Amino acid sequence: MRGVAFWFLVLGVLSGLLGMVWGIQMAATGNHTLSPAHGHLNLIGWVSLVLFAFYYHTVPAAAVSRLAKLHFGVAALGLVIIVPGIAMAISGSGETLAKVGSLITLISMLVFGAVVLRTRES
């Protein structure tokens, strides 16, 4: 695996590992207050990013486009904003970061949709 597929996979695995450690920490302390943020880390970070990695690996024409690189940047940015944003919203520190992260994550999926549609013949 190379290029953008590799980097999606690396970030996905890192997200999965962090999600597991966070889950263990919540179980050990009995405090599950931040479980929605933990869930988003696992779903967006682990599941979505790894699915993107496998798509780009199996459709090499999609992986070499500038749009794929943009997709990686937007997806990574959305992840690192939405997860702490949700944690902040839960803790009462405001919802702005969660809202911004949600919009960036939505844009990431729209970019991915464009990539898929542009490479449907490949």
Image (cartoon, rainbow, N blue to C red):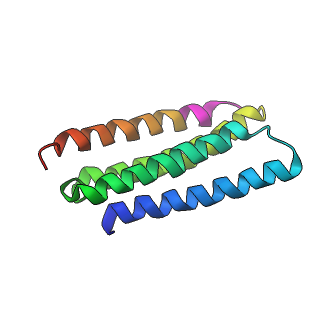
Residue 61 sits in which quadrant?
A: bottom left
Q: Give the left or right position of residue 102, taking residue 52 as reference.
A: right
Total label count?
Answer: 0
Residue 117 is at least partly visible in this image? yes
* Main secondary-structure element of the magenta-colored stretch: helix
Q: Residue furthest left?
A: 121
The quadrant of the rendering that contains the N terminus is bottom left
Front-most of 101 and 118? 118
Name the residue rendered at 87%, 45% in the picture: 30
Q: Residue at x 23, y 55 (%)?
A: 59
User: Residue at 49% across / 48% down in the picture?
Assistant: 47
Query: What percent of the width, then of the height, locates residue 37?
Result: 66, 40
Q: Position of residue 29 (x, y in %)?
A: 88, 50
Question: What residue is at 63 percent from the left and 41 percent from the top?
Answer: 39
Pinpoint residue 91: horizontal percent, then vertical percent.
78, 35
Query: Is the residue 22 above or below the residue 40 in the image?
Result: below
Q: Is 7 inside the magenta-drawn segment? A: no
* Extreme-right residue of the structure: 29
Image vertical order of residue 88 relative to residue 70, above or below: above
Q: Is residue 95 left or right of residue 31?
A: left
Q: Which residues are magenta?
A: 93-100
- Picture layout, residue 45 above or below residue 104: below
Percent from the top left, x then y, of residue 28?
85, 53
79, 57: nearer the viewer: 57
Asked whether residue 93 appears in the rendered view, the answer is: no
